[in-house]
Amino acid sequence: MDVITHFDEIFLKGKNQLMFIRCLADNLDELFPKAAIQRVEGGFVILNLEDDDLERLSKIPGIAKLAPCQVIGNSMDEIKKCLSGMEFDKSVREFRITASRSYKKYPINSDNINRELGGLLIDKYGWKVNLTRPELNIYIDISKDKAVVYINPQEGASGLPIGSAGKVMCLVSGGIDSPVAAYQMMRRGAEVVFVHFQNQTQVTDEVSLKIIDLTKTLAQYQSSIKLFIAPFAECQRQVVMKIPADYRMIITRRLMFRIAEKLSKKENCQALITGDSLGQVASQTLENLTAIYDSVDMLKLAPLIGMNKSEIMKLARKLGTLDISNRPYEDCCSLFVAKHPQTKSKLQDVLELEKQLDLSTLDNLEIISYNISMIKQD
Ligand code: ATP
Ligand code: MG
């Protein structure tokens, strides 16, 4: 299958255009190694895709619109032949043709192309023209050496191509939110590295597999993903022993941030990403977020902070992470959550409690790293 993709307009403005376009082309090259990419006005034509690639392509950051297309010669005869051979939905009554010429020396102007081709279809099917809300919009993009024909393009993910905005590290739990948060950052052009904190006393393989499956699913959009799994049992043991139950969650999350910050420096990541959404769980009140986010100086971003759970779940379903996130397993935090966790923690109290901990354990963790890739192989 061949598909036309149009760039999101935002990055077509300004001097960095070429960088963005190159970045998107490189991403597509890696994600669809068997496809061939051709530059056309405002986008790419991607040749030789598999049928199920269309769905995946609709989630690749940087693409605003896409549609299966036919690439043909640009003579009117060839375009007419192409239209006559196309099959249309039987229910169609109203249509329009939207021709555009990037090759301005083409002998017929767009209006006349629309009229001539429109007339052909009216004669053949008896349809009516509807310029504002057509059921069927047939696009014909004419360039110097070819014409691309497609109908009713669908919305893409839009945003910026992954890698164009730098690198960040996402703290990924086995829950629904953090994988979606990672994708939201990808959609704004960030390359995402993942870190998961694991209590090895749990059923370790099951947990690792879940996190690996989540990252693999996201590797459909960012072709290769680095995942760190950090052992967390010793940190938790200390927290359980030395911190009162209602403050454990907050202090645990502060320790996660500290480890993630160290890793980020090594990986050249510029921000830490979480799946926090305001008020969703006890650790996500403004007071608690203040106490948690104070733990490191590095930039922390929570792209889901203003989203409702239902919106997050909808996106998770679309990305393919929801079913994996829903697999039962105990997140390391849920093992020692207090019945009534602190919802209005005070930073002063947190700092005081934290003095009980030996933070040097954070320096000697044996962190495992994986390179996750989803590139289809034969
Ligand atoms: P999620 O659905 O992403 O698990 P949540 O609503 O369950 O989020 P919390 O469990 O309080 O909320 O976690 C808030 C955020 O802290 C997560 O979105 C994630 O970024 C980070 N986090 C929590 N547990 C872990 C973990 N074990 N490893 C890495 N990050 C974690
Ligand atoms: Mg969680």
Image: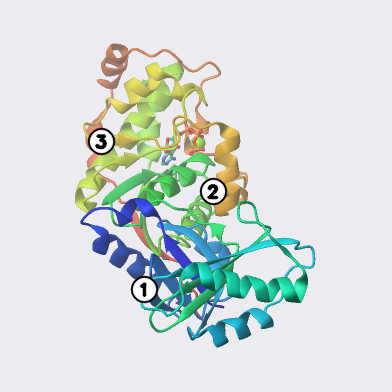
Residue under the point 20% across and 56% down: 15
Label 2 CB less than 8 angstroms from ligand 1:
no
Which amino acid, mark 2?
Val
Give the number of the mark in front: 2 or 3: 3
Label 2 close to label 3 by CB (< 8 Å): no
Give the Cα separation between the discs numbered 2 and 3: 33 Å
Which quadrant of the figure has residue 27? bottom left
Residue under the point 55% across and 31% down: 308
For the N terminus, the quadrant is: bottom right
Give the Cα separation between the discs numbered 1 and 2: 65 Å
Which amino acid, mark 1?
Lys
List the residue tagged with mark 2: 203
Residue 229 visible, this angle: no
- The disc placed on residue 296 is none
9 with respect to 362 (left or right): right
Give the number of the mark in front: 1 or 2: 1
List the residue tagged with mark 3: 299
Which amino acid, mark 3?
Leu
Residue under the point 67% across and 76% down: 120
